[in-house]
Image (tube, rainbow, N blue to C red):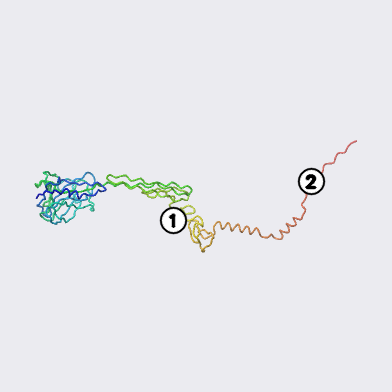
Amino acid sequence: MTSALPGLLGGIAALAFATPAFAQVELKNDGFTSGATLGFQAGFVAGEMGASRLVPPGGTYQLLSVRFLFGPDATQRDIVLRVYDDSAGTDTPGTQLYSSTFPLTGSSTAVQEVNLSAAAVLVTGAFRVAIEFTAAGAPSIARDMDGSIAADKNFVLSQGAWTKSQVLGLSGDWIIRAVVSAQPPDGGTAGAGGSIGTAGTGGASGTTGSAGAGGTTGTGGTTGAAGTSGAIGTAGASGSTGSAGTGGGTGGNAAMACKVNSECATGQYCLNKTTCTYDCRIDTDCGSNQRCTSLGQCEAHPSGGCSCRVNDTGGLSLTALLGAGLLLARRRSRRPLPRRVVRERVRAAGRPRPTQPGPPPPPPAPPVSN
């Protein structure tokens, strides 16, 4: 059964896909063009198949859809679409990659298209697309009538055996096409992380980490997204160097990692067993009726408003002890002296002080002789 389809090529073009992220390729063996004559192949019975071997360029591809003619009778009928690995190049295909049943309504002009994008069928090298019939007679698949046939790419399954179409005396290639999309081997690489933040000076904040570089492009893949700028490092107790960004994340961070409070600097505590930090330095950094502990944490006064400063063990602080010692010393220095000591000091004050001895007298002069 043959017929001319002047508008068929336009129908195929109308079904073209929108521009995808990866290049799409339509694979075919037939030479059918608009206005050419084609033949719908009668004679198939239930369980038999017509199939085409399709060969993509090198690499891995995803099978997006299958396009074929199915007519000419406008009758609804189920078909089973099967996809096989055909890399061995033998009459019998290899492993079946996909199989599903679809209800179709035959047409002498419309191109049937089965969308397989959600099935995620991947092919590497030659594969075979087969149409299995569930009933005898039309509607059926079609072949071109251009006078040529690719002998090693057109097959029929009959009575459980695969045979080349040409061996059975058929001419023309099956009009069975596949749309595939090239897949990258690894995809684009990830963007690099933010750089290490500059060390703080005297507890200053680390500088902003620079943005990570964009990922390189994989073969057929898209470019990985650039890493984001690192955040400004938190002020460190001694201006330590911020840690490096991860996967384009936060840059410099001057805070120290910790598990317990003893691993932190003086005046800091270990927050959630991860990071050293502090909430206050002096009491005025805290709210009303609160005080600042030696770990840099604000807490309520134990007696509801006392301004006394106590340490974390409940004893008086060093400042309070020193103040108490000075006050006690001053009070002791003001106690009156005993009366005995006073009398002795008065007597001593009334006594004449002893004079210091003078120089010895000169020796007598020697007598003068007449």
Label 2: which residue?
358
- Depth check, front residue: 14 or 147: 14
Label placed on residue 271: 1
Which residue of the protein is positioned furthest toward the bottom in this rendering? 303
Relative side of 76 to 197, left or right:
left
Q: Quadrant of the C terminus?
A: top right
Q: Residues within 10 Å of mark 2 (few under 14, many from 20)?
A: few
- Depth check, front residue: 242 or 339: 242
Query: Dot 2: what SS?
Result: loop
Q: Position of residue 95 (x, y in %)?
A: 19, 50
Label placed on residue 61: none
Q: How many marks?
A: 2
Residue appearing at x 44%, y 56% in the figure: 271
Relative side of 194 to 362, left or right:
left
The CA distance from mark 1 to mark 2 is 85 Å
Q: Earlier in the sequence, mark 1 or mark 2?
A: 1
Q: Position of residue 342 (x, y in %)?
A: 72, 59
Q: Are marks 1 and 2 in contact (CB under 8 Å)?
A: no
Residue appearing at x 79%, y 46% in the figure: 358
Residue type at tag 2: Gly
- Depth check, front residue: 342 or 226: 226
Relative side of 148 to 221, left or right:
left
Q: Position of residue 154 (x, y in %)?
A: 14, 47
Q: Residues within 10 Å of mark 1 (few under 14, many from 20)?
A: some
Query: Dot 1: what SS?
Result: strand
Q: Position of residue 147 (x, y in %)?
A: 11, 44
Which residue of the protein is positioned furthest toward the right in this rendering? 370
The mark lying in front, picked from 1 and 2, is 1
Residue type at tag 1: Leu
